Image (cartoon, grey):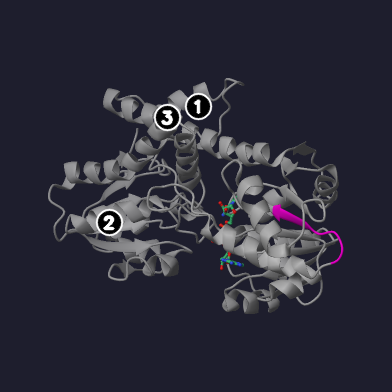
C-alpha cells in the first residue's frame, strides 16, 4: 500500500523505514528540510539501532521524503500524523502541531478524488481524533467523514529499541469510526506476527495513556519503596527482585533510581492529569507519580552534598546525559535536572555520554564535555551516574584519575569497588 508519514522524528522515521521494510511505498513529510535531505540520502535524522540499515536499503526506492504535503497525499492511500504533541507551560497537551499538520493534510485532501485514510499516530488525549483532528480535516478538505477515513493508531515503541519494537510488537491498536478505514489501517500490519486490537479512536487514545501511566506508576512506586528502604538500610533491589516474581506484578520497571525521563512518560502522565482535570476529576495517584519522579534527581544532589558539603568550585563528573541508554534523546532526561542543580550549587560539571553530548550542548553550553568517561572523571571530586549505558558497568581503573573517589550511582549499575566510596540513590 502507499503511505505518507507526516513528521519524521523518532516515531515517523522508524515507522516509515519499517513500513518500507514491510513492502509498502512510503513518502515522508517534514517541515525540517535538513531531515528531508538526510532521509533521501539514506541517513537517519536520529540514532536508532537498525534504522541506518533500513534507510540505506529503502531510500530512493520505496522510501522518500518531501516538504510537499500535496505531493505526499496524492501518492498515498493512508497518511499517518506522527508530529509531536508536547506539554504546554501548565503540563497540558499542546495540540498546536497536530492541528497545523491536520490543516495541511485537509487542504491536500481537497483535490483527491478517491478514498484516503488519515491516521493519528501521535499520542493525543482521548477525544482528540474525533473532536479536534476530524473537524479540522472536514473544514480544510471540504469533504464529509465517509468520503475519507479517520483512525487512531497509537505507537508503543521504545526509543533505543524502536525498530525491533515496530517489527515485533506485543500489541497493535487500531481505533476507527468506521470498519472500512480500520480494515485498511490493520492491513498495513499484516506482515507482522501480532493480533490487531480493533476499537474506537477515543479508546485507542486512552489505551496509550493508560499504558504509559501504568509504567510510570511502576517506576515511581519502585522509587518510593527504594527511598524508604534506603532509610531503613534495606536493599530495595533484593526486595523488588522477590516482589517481581509475583505473576500479577512482573519483574519489569521495578528498578529504583533517578526516575523516568524521555519524550513520553513525563509528558503523557501530565497530559492525562490535564485531561482528567478538564473533565472534573482530580487524579490523585497520577499527580503523586509525577511528584515522586521530580524529586529523585534532587535526591542525588542532596546525597552528594551530604558527602561533600558545599559544592562550590567542586568538579562533579556526570556520566550519562541521554534520558536512557541506546539513544541520543535528552528530552526530560534526569541529567538536565541534576546538572541544573549542580550549577546552581556552584559546582563545575564535566560530562560524558556516548551519544548525547551534542544534544546536551544545546541546553548547557558552558559545562565541559568529554569523549570518554575517563576524561570526564579526571580530577573530579565525585561522579554521578545518571544513564544506564552498558559501557559504564565495566568502568574500573577509569575511577583512579578522580581527585576524590566518590560515586553516586543513580541506576544501580556498579558493584561496590575497593578504594571507592560508593553510594546508591535508593539502596
Ligand atoms: N519518541 C517516542 O519514543 C514515542 C513513542 C510512542 C509515541 N510517541 C508519540 O509520537 C509523536 C511523535 O513523537 P516523536 O518523538 O517522533 O517526535 P519528534 O519531535 O521527534 O518528531 C516530530 C517531527 O515532526 C516534524 N514536524 C513538526 N511540525 C510539522 C508539520 N506541521 N508538518 C510535518 N512535520 C512536522 C518535526 O520537524 C519533527 O521532525 C508524539 O506524540 C509522541 O508522544 C513517541
Q: Mark 3 points at which residue?
A: 282
Where ligand 1 lies, by image quadrant?
A: bottom right
Q: What element carries label 2?
A: helix
Alpha carbons under labels 3 and 2: distance apart: 31 Å
The tag on residue 241 is 1
- Can residue 81 be spotted in the picture? no
Q: Which dot, 2 or 1, sits closer to the camera?
A: 2
Q: Nearer the viewer, residue 126 or 303?
A: 126
Q: Which dot, 3 or 2, sits closer to the camera?
A: 3
Coordinates of residue 380 in the picture (x, y in percent)? 24, 59
| First in sequence: mark 3 vs mark 1 | 1
Q: Give the range drawn in magenta.
A: 113-119
Cβ of mark 3 under 8 A from ligand 1: no
| First in sequence: mark 3 vs mark 2 | 3
Coordinates of residue 424 in the picture (x, y in percent)? 33, 38
- Can residue 298 be spotted in the picture? yes
- Residue 202 position (above or below residue 75): above
Q: Mark 2 points at which residue?
A: 340
Q: How crowded is mark 2: few (under 14 residues within 10 Å), some or many (20 or more)?
A: some
Amino acid at each position: 500500500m502507499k503511505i505518507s508519514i507526516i513528521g519524521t522524528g523518532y516515531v515517523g522515521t522508524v515507522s516509515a523505514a519499517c513500513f518500507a521494510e514491510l513492502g509498502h511505498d512510503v513518502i515522508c513529510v517534514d517541515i525540517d528540510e535538513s531531515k528531508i535531505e538526510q532521509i533521501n540520502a539514506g541517513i537517519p535524522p536520529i540514532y536508532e539501532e537498525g534504522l541506518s540499515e533500513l534507510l540505506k536499503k529503502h531510500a530512493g526506492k520505496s522510501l522518500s521524503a518531501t516538504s510537499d504535503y500535496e505531493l505526499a497525499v496524492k501518492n498515498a492511500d493512508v497518511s499517518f500524523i506522527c508530529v509531536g504533541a508536547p506539554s504546554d507551560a501548565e503540563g497540558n497537551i499542546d495540540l498546536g502541531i497536530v492541528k497545523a499538520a491536520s490543516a495541511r493534510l485537509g487542504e491536500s485532501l481537497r483535490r483527491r478524488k478517491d478514498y484516503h485514510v488519515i491516521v493519528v499516530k501521535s499520542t493525543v488525549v482521548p477525544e482528540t481524533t474525533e473532536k479536534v483532528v476530524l473537524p479540522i480535516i472536514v473544514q480544510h478538505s471540504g469533504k464529509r467523514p465517509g468520503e475519507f477515513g479517520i483512525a487512531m493508531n497509537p505507537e508503543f515503541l521504545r526509543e533505543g529499541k524502536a525498530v525491533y519494537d515496530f517489527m515485533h510488537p506485543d500489541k497493535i491498536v487500531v481505533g476507527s469510526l468506521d470498519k472500512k478505514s480500520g480494515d485498511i489501517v490493520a492491513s498495513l500490519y499484516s506482515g507482522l506476527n501480532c493480533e490487531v486490537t480493533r476499537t474506537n479512536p477515543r479508546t485507542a487514545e486512552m489505551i496509550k495513556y493508560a499504558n504509559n501511566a501504568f509504567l510510570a506508576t511502576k517506576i515511581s512506586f519502585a522509587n518510593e519503596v527504594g527511598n524508604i528502604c534506603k532509610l531503613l538500610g534495606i536493599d530495595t533491589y533484593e526486595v523488588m527482585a522477590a516482589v517481581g516474581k509475583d505473576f500479577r506484578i512482573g519483574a519489569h520497571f521495578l528498578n529504583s533510581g533517578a526516575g523516568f525521563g524521555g519524550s513520553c512518560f513525563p509528558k503523557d502522565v501530565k497530559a492525562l492529569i490535564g485531561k482528567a482535570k478538564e473533565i472534573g476529576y482530580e487524579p490523585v495517584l497520577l499527580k503523586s507519580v509525577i511528584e515522586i519522579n521530580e524529586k529523585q534527581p534532587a535526591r542525588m544532589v542532596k546525597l552528594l552534598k551530604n558527602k561533600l558539603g558545599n559544592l562550590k568550585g567542586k568538579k562533579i563528573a556526570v556520566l550519562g546525559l541521554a534520558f536512557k541508554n541506546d539513544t541520543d534523546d535528552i528530552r526530560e532526561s534526569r541529567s538536565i535536572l541534576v546538572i541544573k542543580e549542580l550549577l546552581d550549587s556552584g559546582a563545575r560539571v564535566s560530562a560524558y555520554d556516548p551519544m548525547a553530548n551534542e544534544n546536551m550542548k544545546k541546553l548547557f553550553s558552558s559545562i565541559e564535555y568529554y569523549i570518554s568517561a575517563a576524561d570526564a572523571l579526571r580530577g573530579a571530586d565525585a561522579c554521578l551516574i545518571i544513564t544506564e549505558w552498558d559501557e559504564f558497568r565495566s568502568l574500573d581503573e577509569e575511577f583512579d584519575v578522580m581527585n576524590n573517589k566518590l560515586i553516586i550511582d543513580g541506576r544501580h549499575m556498579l558493584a561496590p569497588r575497593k578504594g571507592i566510596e560508593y553510594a546508591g540513590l535508593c539502596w
